[in-house]
Image (cartoon, helix red, strand yellow):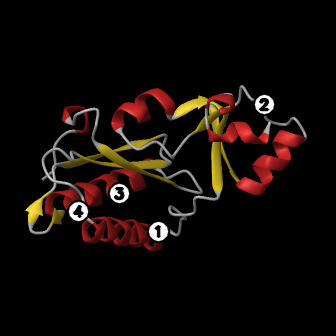
Amino acid sequence: MYIPFDNLPEESRIWIYQSNRKFSDAEIADIESDLKNFIEDWVAHGTSLEASFITKYNRFIIIAVNQEVQQATGCSIDKSVEFIQSLEQKYKVDLLDKMNVTYKQGEFLTHKSLIDFKRMAKEKAVSPNTIVFNNLVNTIEEWKESWEVPAEDSWHSRFF
């Protein structure tokens, strides 16, 4: 069951998928339509999940579930991953590779492999103050507080 993202409790579980390229506005409109349709029908053991999504910067897809109503189960999580894989195929993008880093360079977003980001940190091309996206956050509350942060305040800090 789809509900607006802002109506979900702060403790709702989230999954963040980052694209290796920026989506066009038209692609985002189509993706959001597909996401809404998927979430409307998303269930765990036959019970509708109270869920939502938000897209950010034409690059990130964040799916959220209110686990107080019904917990996402292994099978329902598998269904969401299958849906994300269908988006990867449809738009020829990578959304599931966790070995990539997205960070801000001024007002622009840059996407690099983890190996390149580590090298850039060593070469001081990025700093502990570089704004990174910590896609390991697990709840809406953590997302609001700790998603878009200086590298020194996330798991990226180990590279400095």
Q: Are marks 3 and 4 in contact (CB under 8 Å)?
A: no
Q: Is residue 9 above or below residue 138?
A: above
On the rendered structure, is 97 left or right of 83?
A: right
Would you name the residue on which mark 4 appears? Answer: 38
Q: Position of residue 7 (x, y in %)?
A: 19, 33
Q: Point out the tag, 1 or 3, that comes first from the N-terminus.
A: 3
C-alpha separation, residue under disc 1 versus residue under disc 2: 31 Å
Q: Point out the tag, 1 or 4, that comes first from the N-terminus.
A: 4
As shown in the figure, which amino acid type bears the numbered disc 4? Phe
Please tell me the numbered disc located at residue 146: none
Label 1 vs label 3, nearer the camera:
1
Please tell me the numbered disc located at residue 31: 3
Q: Are marks 2 and 3 in contact (CB under 8 Å)?
A: no
On the rendered structure, is 100 left or right of 47?
A: right
Would you name the residue on which mark 2 appears? Answer: 127
As shown in the figure, which amino acid type bears the numbered disc 2? Ser
Please tell me the numbered disc located at residue 88: 1
Q: Point out the tag, 2 or 3, that comes first from the N-terminus.
A: 3
C-alpha separation, residue under disc 2 versus residue under disc 3: 33 Å
Q: Position of residue 54 (x, y in %)?
A: 34, 43
Mark 1 burial class by Cα count in 10 Å: few <14, some 14-19, many 20+: some
